[in-house]
Structures are given as C-alpha cells and as structure tokens.
C-alpha cells in the first residue's frame, strides 16, 4: 500500500534571521521561509496612486522580490496550510496582506492562517499557533493610508522644490516638520542675546568638624535673591565685601529621606533616546541592533509604545532578583507601569529580554553594538522591578549678620543610603557630605567667591531630544523616528556638529522657508499630529482611510497648482563665475550648487567633468586654540570634510599630495565625529 504523502505547513516571516530562529522551534511538518520584507510596493518611477478613482494604489512586485516570490508560490500551492507570521504592527499586517494577494491565496481562505507574537520564543510561537486569527483589514488600511499620504506629499511636492530651488530635493510629511523644528531652534539661537548675572558662594567650616562645605547666597535683607538678581560684578563685589564682616551661624537644619523610583522598561522612543545618550547610537543603529536581538529571540518586539509587562516576565524577573541580589532587593509585589500615551496599544508589551535570567554576559550575538544594546534593555527591565533608591538629604540654612544687612545662604547634603534599582541601572549623581550641624552652631567663612554667569540659548537638538519632542507633539509613531532622522541627514538638510547636535544646512533652511511660506499645513505641528490621530482612527476601524486622504488631497492639490504659478524660482542654484582655471582643459571653473552645497565645476561640462570642493575649511583647532597641523605631513592643516555619502571625516588640506584621513578628530582623539551617524 502506498505511503500517504506527508503534509507540510508553510510559515512565512519577513527576514531570514527570523525564519532561522522560528525554524529552530518548529521541526516536523513545518517549512519556515522568508519573504525578505515587502513583496509588493508602489512603483518608484511614477506616482502609483489613482487620484481619480478614490486614491486606489497601484502595487507592483519589485524586480528583486520576484525570484523569491515565485519560490513561495510553489511552496504555498503544495502546503496544507500557509501561516503568515509577520510582525504584529501595521507594517507586519500589511506585509501579510500583500503576501495573500501576491501569492494568489485569496481563493483558498481556508488554508490561510495569521499568527502574531510579541517575542520569538518556543512558548510564544506554540501559543500563537494555537490561536490563529484573520488578517485585520483596518490595520492594513492604516498602513496603506500612511503610504498613500506620504507618496502624495513626496511625489507631488518634491518636483515643486526641484523647479523652484534645484533638482534632487525631497519633501515629506514628517521629515518636513522635523526639519522645521531644527531650523526654528537655530533661529532662536541666532536671535538670542546673553544676559550677564552673578552668584555668590561661600566656603564654610565648623571648628572641629569636617568637611568644609559650600553654601550659596539666597536672601538679602529677607528678600529672596532671584537667579538674575545680581546684575554685574560690581554688585557682587559689594555683597562680598559686606559678607566678609558678617558673623555666621546655622539657622534651620532639615533632614529627610528622599526616595527615587526606577524608570519604566523601554518603549521604542525611550530606547532610542537612552541608546543615543549612553551608547552614542543613532536611532537607525539602535533599531538595526534591536531588530537583530528580536529576530534571534533575545528581546520582545522593538516597535511599541506600551510599558505593559506580562505576568510571566515579571515572575521571571523576581526569581532572578531573589537568586542574584537577595531578598533585600525583592519588592513585595511586582511593579506595574501605566502608559501615559492615550494612543498606546496596551495589548503590546514593553521592550524587555525574553529571558530575564539571561544576563548580558551569557548571550552571543554577531555585533558588539547589539550586545551593548541588550545590556541596556536587560538592565532597564531588571531595574524596573528593583526597590527605590534611598538618599539621606540635608538642607542647611546659614544666617549671616553684618552691620549693614542680614543674609541667608543655603547648603545641601546628599548621601546614598540604599542603592535599590541603581544596582542594575547605574546613574551619575554627586554625593555631598556635610559636617554635623545643629541650629545656632557658629560657622566661619573661609572664602567668598563671586562667580560670573551668562544666560544660554536653547540647546540644539540631538537625536535623543529630537525624538522626545516629536513624541511629545504626537508627530510620527515608533516606526517613523529613525527613518525620519536618517532622511533629513541623507538629503543634507541638516548635519551634526562636533557636539553631535543638529544644525540646518543652507539648503535645509531654504527648503524649510519654501515649505513654511507656501505649504504651511505640511509643516504645521498640530496638523501633522492630527493626521497621526486620524491614521490611528483608521487602525481602530473607526474611520475610512479614503475619507482622510480625500480631505487632505483636495485643498493640497489646488494650492500646489496655485503655487507653481505664483512662486518665483530661487536664485540659490545659479552658477557663479570664478577666476580659477580648470587644470584639465584650461576652461574657467564655475561655482555650482548640489545637494551637499557649493562646489567647483568646469564650464566645459559635459566634455570636461572635472569637479572639486571649494576650499571651505571648517577649522579644527588644538587645545591651545591654534589651527591644527596635519600629523602626517606637518605642512597642511586638518579640516572637516564630507564623503560622497554625506558622512564627515578629517583630512589634510594638501590632498591629494597628502592622503591623511581619519574618522577621529585628531584634536579630540577620544571622540569620533562619525560615530552614531550610520
């Protein structure tokens, strides 16, 4: 009797790494394959949206996806079941839907299953297989609406910028708002005028007791001294002279116990912010490393805005804490965090290790950056279930009496009593020890120090602070922060200075000006935030996505047509004549403008394609403030340059005679300018 043919269940995920990890859990009867991301997309060469027929998108199969898709079709036709196991967010739901369409599986709905899971572990996969569901059309619609909306803005507004400024520029819904925030901060900094103010500090001692301590002048004649209360050095010196003749004694002494709570486990935005602060990772790097960890089954899904934690993970964390740290560090009950964002999806979990007992020293990953990120995620999660840190805080009032006036100064002491969550999540803090002080104790002033200060402008955004403000305004969602920040750098609209903070380029400011003046709704913070809420409404099944696109597109298209006629072409990209001669063909060189700024090009183009950079030296100075000489040839100077991909490096002004180049600023050898920019 012939043996019955063995049935195979086909499981499709997005990436090969994820396929390998899941394949390790599913053995007999399962074939786990990768779609290698999206299998259908809008065409690159045209709009791909039928605006006349309710914005119907026209999807194509990209050339690079065709071979793999044909293989999946053959496997799907033979399989008894096709299990779509793509990520649980809108993007993953859309990929599952596109697979359904591209594989021609709509005619056999009975063999299609959709499963989701928050972590790639054996238990999570088995549980998901027991509870399959259908593809959620409203999540697909929300992703489709975002894609259509962004395509309409990008493909219709970018040509406007090409015509009015120069070719190669782009506009985008979220990227344009991010650019506006950076440009407006730069304008604030330019307009800022520093104000001078002074403070007065005294170093005091109590005879027979250590240590000496510093106190700050807070009141004069019973009136509180505001931050800007001492306007100049002369006023500060007058106060110091009178304080020298004063007698000092201790007034009130307030002692209390201060408790600090641990932060919640990570969500996408806080992970990107903290990785930027502590590890100097860009948002793009952070998400790449997190993807690696997730697909290898080490962390839960990394695109989330919820701080929810499963009961199993909390129980596992408590077991680890008890065994490794002892009962002293075990809180009575697991700490539960509430998500502040009303838009967060509470069914999701925070980003955490899948196995809390797997400490960072026990994991093996391909990239050092991924291991560092795991350490950060693991520590934050474990710390979230540790006790409060406890400090002994002391506030001391010092009263000084002179013939002219009565003064009050304040000193604070701070000593760590119990480290609590700091055991797993180290933080910088300064302990200040005070001598034993009681009311009416006499103290002696050892030194009086007037100190000059100036008000400072608001700081430029770095990646962490930009993500924070985008999140606060409700602009973008967890999956959009990294690509948004990446694209405004790739387009050369902004660049990072040596402090790793964003500054707009000349062309970035011009693009922002053009958009702000002519398409204010595109760069309007409230409008963009409302659009995100509308997309969330689609995801919840409350709103039809066509309606949202229609309400946006009709006035947008009308205004765009009007602006094409009204707005004059900018003279930004006009060619400028120079006295320099091309060394290849002896024709005059012209100053032209490209995406990365101005450069020299031969007027004989296209016959002669000679180009070179303008001698725009971004001065690198040493600690003495002198222009730094090249360490290789000792003749040229070190300047900051840019690669063709837009990344900064340091090179010699004598290139090509001297080929010195370094990612590391030779004046600051411990810092890498390009680090975190990938």
Image (cartoon, rainbow, N blue to C red):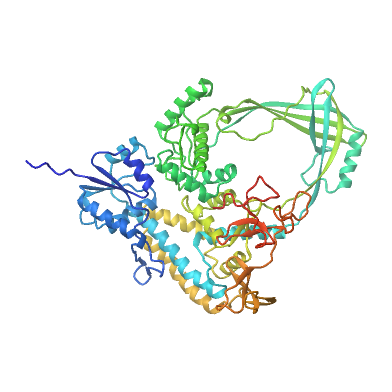
Question: Nearest the camera: 655 or 615?
Answer: 655
Residue at the (76%, 29%) spot, across then down: 396
Residue at the (9%, 42%) spot, across then down: 2
The quarter in which the N terminus is drawn is top left
Q: Can residue 256 be seen in this view?
A: yes
Q: Where is residue 254 in the image (x, y as percent from the top left)?
A: 72, 27
Q: Residue furthest left?
A: 1
Q: Position of residue 124 (x, y in %)?
A: 34, 37
315 horizontally vs 213: left or right:
left
508 horizontally vs 31: left or right:
right
* Figure quadrant of residue 235: top right
70 horizontally vs 372: left or right:
left
Residue at the (42%, 53%) spot, across then down: 536
Q: Where is residue 203 in the image (x, y as percent from the top left)?
A: 83, 32
Question: Nearest the camera: 625 or 330?
Answer: 625
1 horizontally vs 197: left or right:
left
Q: Can residue 574 be seen in this view?
A: no
Query: Total number of numbered labels?
Result: 0
Question: Nearest the camera: 630 or 411?
Answer: 630
Question: Nearest the camera: 199 or 492?
Answer: 492
């Amino acid at each position: 009797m012939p043996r019955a043919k063995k049935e195979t269940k086909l499981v499709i995920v997005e990436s090969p790494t994820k396929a390998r990890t899941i394949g390790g859990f599913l053995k007999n009867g399962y074939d786990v394959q990768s779609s290698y991301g999206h299998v259908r997309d809008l065409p690159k060469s045209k709009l791909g949206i039928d605006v006349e027929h309710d914005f119907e998108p026209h999807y194509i199969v990209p050339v690079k996806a065709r071979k793999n898709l044909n293989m999946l079709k053959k496997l799907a036709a033979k399989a008894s079941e096709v299990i779509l196991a793509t990520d649980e967010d809108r993007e993953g739901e859309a990929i599952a839907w596109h697979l359904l369409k591209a594989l021609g599986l709509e005619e056999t709905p009975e063999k299609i299953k959709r499963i989701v899971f928050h972590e790639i572990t054996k238990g999570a996969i088995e549980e998901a297989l027991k509870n399959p569901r259908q593809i959620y059309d409203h999540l697909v619609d929300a992703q489709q609406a975002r894609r259509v909306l962004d395509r309409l803005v990008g493909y219709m507004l970018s040509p406007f910028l090409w015509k009015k400024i120069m070719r190669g520029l782009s506009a985008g819904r979220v990227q344009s708002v991010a650019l506006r925030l950076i440009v407006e901060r730069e304008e604030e900094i330019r307009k800022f005028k520093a104000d001078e103010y002074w403070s007065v500090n005294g170093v005091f001692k109590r005879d027979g007791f250590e240590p000496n301590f510093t106190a700050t002048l807070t009141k004069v004649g019973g009136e509180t001294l505001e931050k800007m209360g001492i306007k100049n050095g002369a006023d500060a010196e007058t106060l110091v002279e009178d304080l020298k003749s004063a007698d000092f004694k201790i007034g009130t002494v307030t002692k209390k116990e201060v408790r600090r709570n641990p932060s919640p486990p990570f969500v996408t935005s806080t992970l990107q912010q903290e990785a930027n602060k502590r590890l100097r990772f860009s948002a793009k790097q952070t998400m790449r490393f997190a993807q690696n960890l997730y697909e290898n089954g080490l962390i839960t899904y990394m695109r989330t805005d919820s701080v929810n934690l499963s009961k199993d993970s909390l129980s596992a964390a408590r077991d680890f804490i008890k065994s490794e740290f002892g009962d002293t560090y075990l809180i009575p009950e697991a700490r539960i965090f509430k998500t502040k964002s009303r838009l967060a999806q509470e069914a999701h979990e925070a980003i955490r290790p899948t196995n809390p007992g797997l400490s960072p020293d026990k994991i093996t990953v391909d990239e050092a950056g991924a291991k560092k990120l795991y350490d950060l995620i693991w520590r934050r999660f474990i710390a979230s279930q540790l006790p409060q840190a406890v400090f002994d805080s002391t506030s001391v009032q010092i009263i000084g009496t002179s013939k002219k006036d009565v003064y009050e100064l304040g000193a604070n002491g701070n000593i760590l009593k119990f480290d609590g969550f700091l055991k797993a999540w180290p933080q910088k803090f300064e302990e200040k020890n005070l001598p034993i002080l009681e009311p009416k104790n006499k103290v002696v002033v050892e030194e009086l120090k007037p100190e000059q200060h100036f008000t400072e402008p608001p700081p430029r955004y770095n990646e962490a602070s930009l993500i924070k403000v985008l999140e606060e305004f409700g602009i973008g969602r967890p999956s959009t922060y990294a690509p948004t920040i990446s694209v405004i750098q790739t387009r050369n609209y902004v660049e990072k200075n040596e402090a790793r903070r964003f500054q707009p380029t000349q062309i970035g400011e011009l693009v922002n000006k053009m958009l702000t003046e002519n398409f204010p709704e595109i760069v309007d913070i409230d409008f963009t935030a409302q659009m995100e809420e509308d997309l969330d409404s689609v995801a919840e099944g409350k709103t039809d996505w066509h309606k949202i696109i229609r309400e946006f597109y009709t006035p947008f298209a009308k205004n765009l047509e009007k602006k094409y006629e009204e707005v004059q072409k900018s003279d930004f990209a006009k060619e400028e004549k120079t006295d320099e001669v091309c060394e290849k063909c002896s024709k005059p060189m012209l100053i032209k403008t490209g995406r990365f700024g101005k450069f020299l090009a031969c007027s004989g183009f296209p016959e002669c394609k000679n180009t070179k950079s303008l001698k725009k030296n971004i001065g690198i100075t040493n600690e003495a403030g002198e222009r730094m000489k090249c360490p290789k040839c000792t003749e040229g100077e070190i300047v900051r340059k840019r690669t063709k991909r837009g990344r900064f490096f340091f090179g010699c002004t004598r290139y090509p005679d001297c080929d010195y180049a370094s990612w590391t600023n030779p004046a600051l050898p411990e810092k890498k300018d390009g680090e975190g920019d990938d």
